[in-house]
Image (cartoon, coloured by chain):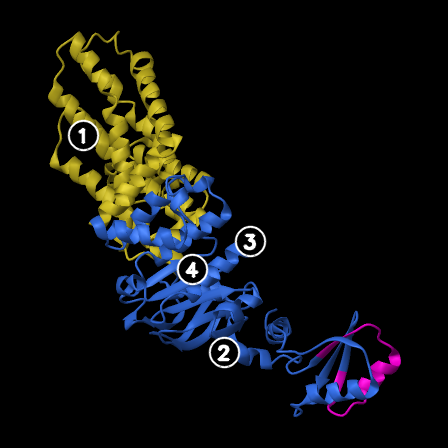
Chain colours: A yellow, B blue
Amino acid sequence: MNIGVVLKRELSGYFATPVAYVFIFIFLVLAGVFTFYVGNFYERQQADLVPFFSFHPWLYLFLIPAISMRLWSEERKSGTLELLMTLPLSRWDIVLGKFLAAWLFAGIALVLTFPIWLTVNFLGHPDNGVILASYIGSWLMAGGFLAIGSCMSALTRSQVVAFVLCGFVTLMFVMAGFPLVLDIVRGWLPLSLVDVIASLSFLTHFNAISRGVLSLQDFLYFISMILAWLFATSIVLDLKKGG
Amino acid sequence: MIEVSHLSKHYGDFVAVNDLSFRLVPGDILGFLGPNGAGKSTTMKMLTGFLRPTSGDISIWGSDVWTDTLAAQSHIGYLPEGAPAYEEMTPLGFLNFIAEARGLSGPDRDDAVSKASATMSLESVLNQKIETLSKGFKRRVGMAQAILHDPDVLILDEPTDGLDPNQKHEVREMIKGLSKEKIVIVSTHILEEVTAVCNRVMVLAGGAIVSDGAPEDLLTLSRHHGAVTLELIEITEELTSAFQSLDGVDEVEREDNRLTLMPVSDVTDLFSRVMSFIREKDVTVTAAFVEQGRLDDVFRTLTEGDAQ
């Protein structure tokens, strides 16, 4: 399958440079710092991973743009986009293949946090079902971040601009259920639309999942978020073709 | 077969390509010649389906590039300008990826990759990262990925740009050695390249075709076509005016120790007239030849007016 061809090349591209190793290292260090120092993992005296997962949205806010910024900007700048788009591959093969590679990569980084899971199991008797649900929820959320990042990266040939754009847009989505965003729109949007915006919040859906409730609604929310932004990516690529 | 009809590309008010129409059949090696910004690369990007034309149609072996993109693209091997490649990969990994993207797998893929890398003499660097390779090798990697699937149409955007003379020669030989069943389109602003490899030349300026024909025909447009150039040990005023008044000579140009005698338009035997004049006057001449025409002349005349 052609998606597989793109995915394989893209994923091996991550590990061919130090980027992957630096990213994973920083991710693991920060995840640990947040959990143990900011989240007071020990002081809470509770056998769960809430302090670990509750920082993921904030960690993703600047780490995911670092993965996604290169998705299209780098290819556009180095000219390989022209090569890729003139191979007999469909647009979806390319968009999905590249996204899945980035998502798998984020998944690998996430799986490598397993020592924290071992620790909490060593110290007590946590509900591993909740932990599994949280891991899945965190990965789904990473997918949402990455899909937004993919679209932002398709907009520009500058990786820095892609990084900043992605950071901003994802922040808006994380905070969508909070006064920071809602106060801005409340004044001039009908209440029903304000509610729609509030319901788009990453945090609300992630918190539901990380409490151990992997409802179909939250699952569908992240999946449709991903598909919508990938569709937007494909449209942006198409518009750039015409220009 | 390639058919292009009324192809145009506008960027806002700027017209990059203006109403191009042409038809190519197998065996054609077309040279796109023109100054920078003449629309060569833009045309190639539209032929390969990377850019959408503002108007016009392109059909490659019967497949429309816009409605049946993948079918059209599978006929094409393309070397984009600057030979971009995934620099962190090795040529082997890169060529394997291209082969798989072209639908080759298993032994077919391996055969195609080893054949292409042999043609481009890449064997010695196959496992070295592309970013560490010299410009010449990078260009060859780009060529190898373009010819990998033995395409019917080969589109090469400035394939010899930045190469040393030996490498240029190799690339040209490679193009000339391709099967007669293929269509090749090469863009260049190097004039000798056109006469060295192409059997058809299209000169573009300001996005439009200003000349289209065989390279030999292009030379006949030169004002030096059919002129006689003499190398002399000493050139005197007297001699110059003697040549000037010779029957059939339109104009005399002097450059160092050379005199170039331009013929009056319908004179075809200028060389023999000049030679008998030389014998008669006993002038010492170290060399004498008939000019084929000068491409840079033609290039300038054709493109200067149009390309602002």
Q: Which residue occupies the foreground of this view, B160 or B53?
A: B160
Dot 4 surroundings within 10 Å: few (below 14), some, or many (20 or more)? Answer: few
Q: Amino acid at mark 3?
A: Asp
Which residues, given as a range, are shown in magenta? B229-251
Image position, residue A55 (x, y; %) = 29, 23
Image position, residue A224 (x, y; %) = 21, 44
Q: Name the disc covering residue B164, or none.
A: 3
Foreground: disc 1 or disc 3:
3
| Residues at marks 4 and 2, CA–CA distance in whole angstroms | 34 Å
Q: Name the disc covering residue A136, or none.
A: 1
Dot 1: chain letter: A
Foreground: disc 4 or disc 2:
2
Asked if disc 4 and disc 2 are in contact, CB closer than 8 Å, the reply is no
| Residues at marks 1 and 2, CA–CA distance in whole angstroms | 65 Å
Dot 2 surroundings within 10 Å: few (below 14), some, or many (20 or more)? Answer: some
Q: Residue at x 30, y 12 (%)?
A: A36
Q: Residue at x 25, y 33 (%)?
A: A141
| Residues at marks 1 and 3, CA–CA distance in whole angstroms | 55 Å
Dot 4: chain letter: A
Q: Amino acid at mark 2?
A: Ala
Q: Which residue occupies the foreground of this view, A28 or B4?
A: B4
Q: Name the disc covering residue B214, or none.
A: 2
